Image: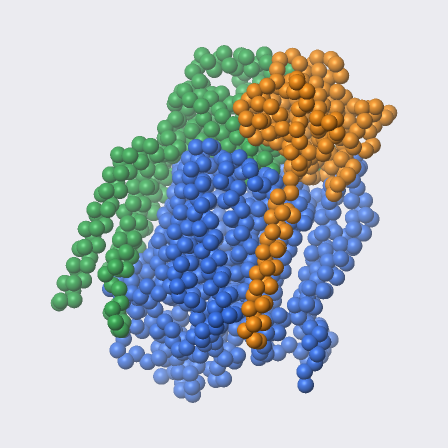
Chain colours: A blue, B orange, C green
Amino acid sequence: MQRPAWRRLIGFNLLGGLVLAGVGFVLGWLLGTLISNLAGAHATDAGAANWFIDQSDENDIALLLAYTFGLVGWLGGLGFLNYPLARIAGRPPSVPPEDTGTGMGRYFRMNTNHKVVGIQYLVVVLALFFIGGLNAMLIRAELLQPTPWLWQPDRYLTLVGLHGTMMLMIMSAGVLGPFGNYLVPIMVGSRGMAFPRIESLSFWLTPAAGVVLLSTLFLGGYQTGWTGYAPLADQSRLGMDAYLVAFTLIGLSMVLVGINLITTIVNMRAPGMTWTRLPIFCWGVLSTGILMVLSPLTFAAALFMVALDRTSATNFFISAVGGSPYLYENLFWFFGHPEVYILALPGFGIVLELMTVFARKPLFGYRLAVAAMLGVAILSFMVWQHHLFVSGINATLRPFYMLTTELISIPTGFVFLVAIGTLWRGRIQLAVPMLFCLAFLFNFLIGGVSGVFVSDVPSDVSLHGSYFVLAHFHYTIMGGLVFAFFGGIYYWFPKMTGYLLNDRLAKVHFWGMFLGFNGTFLPLFAAGLLDMPRRVITYNVNLQGLNDFASISAFVLGLSMLVFLVNFVYSWVVTRVPAVGNLWGSRSVEWMLPSPPPVTTWEASPVFVSGPYEYGVAGAPAMANLAGQERNP
Amino acid sequence: MPVRMRVTLVFAGALVAIAVTVAYLVGYLAVAPPEVQGTSGADAQLTLQTVAAISSGDRPDWVSYLVKDPSGQWIHSTIWKVPANSVIKVTIYQFDTASKLRNPFWAQPLGIVPSSFMVNGTALDSIPSDTASHTFAIPELGVSVPLQGIADDAKNPCVSAPCDTATDHETITFSFRTGAPGKYRWQCFVPCGAGFIFGNGGPMSTIGFMGGFLLVV
Amino acid sequence: MEEQRTNRNHFVRVGVIWLGATLVLEAGLFFWLGPNMPPFQASAQASEQANTNTLLTGLAIPVMLLVWVFVVYSIVVFRRKGEGDGPTIRGHYRTQVAWVVSSAVIVLFLAGYGSYVLMISAYGVGGGQGSDPAAVPAGQTMEVQVIAQEWGFTYRYPTFGGVETQQLVLPVGQLIELHVTSLDVIHSFWAYEIGVKADANPGQDNIAFAKPAEVAPFQIRCAELCGVWHGYMFGTGQVVSQSDFATWIATQQSANAPATAQLPPYAHVYLPVPAQVRGG
């Protein structure tokens, strides 16, 4: 008995979330206006000296309350409050621990099935990634000329900030969101994640963060870039609050994802899934999870302090009245540096995982690879002041931060040894995912070695804050993580959706992306060496050749992304060629399942009897016994 | 779901995406103050006024510059066309009260054609830095001129922009030489964005209020 | 036996390609790129920065080529033909130890050498060292203050009556002690050719040393995002002869006298009074 379509739309789902978010937003705005009027805060008369409350003509209190109430409405409308409220009221919880729903509707509500969350994440991450990428295209279009010709400087800076913030926010969840949620439970032999409701919460915070960030366009934008340095952030217009709220939401989401994945990997492994049989991808996820749990809350605290500065004149970062601009820089980079490894480690995991399949060899130095990831994760907390080498803060500590920063290149170097050793004398297949992995090796090496330049203080004095740094981190994040991410999509998309992607378009995408990417960022190293600071709308006329080359290459990169988008959508929605069997000849357990795996992955727990990388071992058994009857031999 | 419906959905989605993108480009990024012919007459007269509140638009409380176009209309824009390699004669009617210079260095005129800085008809070599209301500075040309504020207890202050010279004001005149054609930024160095930390947010950080471009053609 | 020999042949070929490519690129670095390495040689600090860039490039070439030659060789030679998996190599103890040790040696050398240049040989290499610099050069310095504000730099010469100027002019061969501070948000003073970069923090004094070696103009840019006109916070400084400097500073002292009279007494930091923090 099916209810009419309109009736099915009403309930705890995306629509309900949107409606209640709107209601909450309006309520919060009204409350904030009331508060600030009562406090005499919203005085536009500059002469009224009330130093406790901000008195520009923009009401930050109302906006921040509007976002907060809107968020509560959003989560309530999606049904996240049902479970805690039911428990508080003493009623039995209404949310099933594992959602077995089918049909399109399951993607538009709170869903506790890890495979649904994985798909939800994949779509939202790609959508926001393309928005960030569009901004990059508009930035490069502006930089075709050495003086402003398309956008005004204030709009341009918002563009730069939106690109950076969107990419950093979204790509932190770029691999762990879709692939972590979807694959890790399968790889460790669990039926789902440790905390399914938290899993869904971490996802639904992501689109909220994206929308909040984009709302800055209606609020005057923000001119601080993705770093949001105070006191510039204190000075900025209402659009800054969108940044503060959006990044806080993503920070919360990161903590939740991290806790969930760590717990799943540690506690939910099936019998026989020993630590040395754990796929290297899971190790990458685990080490990223550690960073995600430990680092974002510092940043959330810093953002909260900026919000207080902006609403209540707490002056944490205003030195004229007792604050310190160094405070924000330290809090920010204590998060910011682990964050860039949050953007690297999942890439290591994907690349090494895929490389064994396409080189038909076991991973070379499994323990070394694990040590690499954990070593990078631990060291990444000890390096943050290398972003402040010329800031004047405690100059005697600079040799220490130079040392710790350069020490990171030791575990990072392990990854290259493991990759080379795995390729060496293998039976290499240049399938599309493998092309992305090899490109990762090429790009990430440039990114890593240029990192040694900026970690060395004598070089960094010249390179800090220049396009050299910009090219460096694009080589690690874009050339590293994003290439690994697309490799992962080409590899696992058939598994996750059950449909094949077009191979020819995939190759066009790869070559466009590889050449476009290198064409964009190699010249920018030179631009940085030759006196071009970051985030400028003007540059020296003699750098126009380099910049034009970079811009045109960036457009090639952008076009290749469109090719991907067409391939992705067309293959998933229109052509729908079914993916049958073990496409890549992988030994990993997810390829022992049908594509896509059934809603409930396994009725009984699988038993792992072998490692994932037993390539070339005569008579090696399949990785897992899916009958679930036998115990570990 | 039938194929036809799926395809329709994809195309609808693509159309929405393109529409949103275009709206973003046109509705946010390409929004800019109009380019106004700044100088008029054979002697390249540039006439400006600074007001305490622009009184219209979406930011009526913000402090702003206005420019007089060749037809004598006051236009709310900070992007002005002026001729290259010529002496520009500037007249600024200043209707705002004094704030204070953060850096008193800007209390003297700099980079102007010598001894032509007049305040209400009197030649001066500087003004007291805490009487400054705004400055007019073109850093690339080395030009910087302080604009004295009207008294806080002025009898007849301007209430609505564009202001009439019948209300209380200061008249500042000076000349400067433009160089080669190009796009030069100009800004104010008085932290006059009331309510924003350091006074440099809001109107100081938005093109069209306290900063803009000199299009030297 | 046969397999071992092929394996050794592979290694020999990779080694030869690697060595050849390394020699070619190192020669290019030595004869062409090294002598032209940014940020060039216009001051003692810029020279150290350029020399470190050259050294790091020299070390990076063999390391990067090692990885690339191995990867490209593998792609070309070890392509899969037909079915079948590769040999089961799970690791190689000596290779792994050698890799760990050699990367550790390179890294420790770089950190040690970098620290030596930073703290001992080049007085902080032109980087901002805060108000209490750790690496201080011997000899007479000339103090010049850089005042950043939204959106421009001005300069103050305390030994010349505290005169403030719009342009930065420095005498050649003189050791300069730059005191960088800001009146509002964080900026960063970057004098490219003379190799100085120091953040301008409100309420903080950030000292950097430089010794200009050539009479030439140099680029000044703001290297920290500071708001709407960040991209326009640039200028050109001049390094001039001692006598030209004396003439220039005398002109500035008389021309800027009206403003100098109003300036606050020279100090290492200037803060707006609290009532002015919110502007207006």
Whether residue C151 is visible: yes
In the image, is C7 to the left or to the right of A346? left
The front one of A628 and A471 is: A471
Residue at 30%, 69% in the rendered image: A360
Q: Position of residue A23 (x, y in %)?
A: 75, 61
Whether residue A390 is visible: no
In the image, is A522 to the left or to the right of C4? right
Residue at 61%, 15% in the rendered image: B113
Using the image, determine if residue B151 lies above or below residue B52: above
Quarter containing the N terminus of chain A? bottom right
Which image quadrant for residue C205? top right
In the image, is A569 to the left or to the right of A82? left
Residue extending farthest to the bottom is A629
Residue at 26%, 42% in the rendered image: C25
Residue at 73%, 27% in the rendered image: B71
Using the image, determine if residue A181 lies above or below residue A580: above
> How many numbered callouts?
0
Q: Position of residue A562 (x, y in %)?
A: 48, 57
Q: Position of residue B73 (x, y in %)?
A: 75, 29
Residue extending farthest to the left is C1
The front one of B5 and A57 is: B5
Quarter containing the C terminus of chain A? bottom left
Q: Position of residue A364 (x, y in %)?
A: 30, 64
Using the image, determine if residue A71 lies above or below residue B99: below
Which image quadrant for residue A631? bottom left
Residue extending farthest to the right is B155
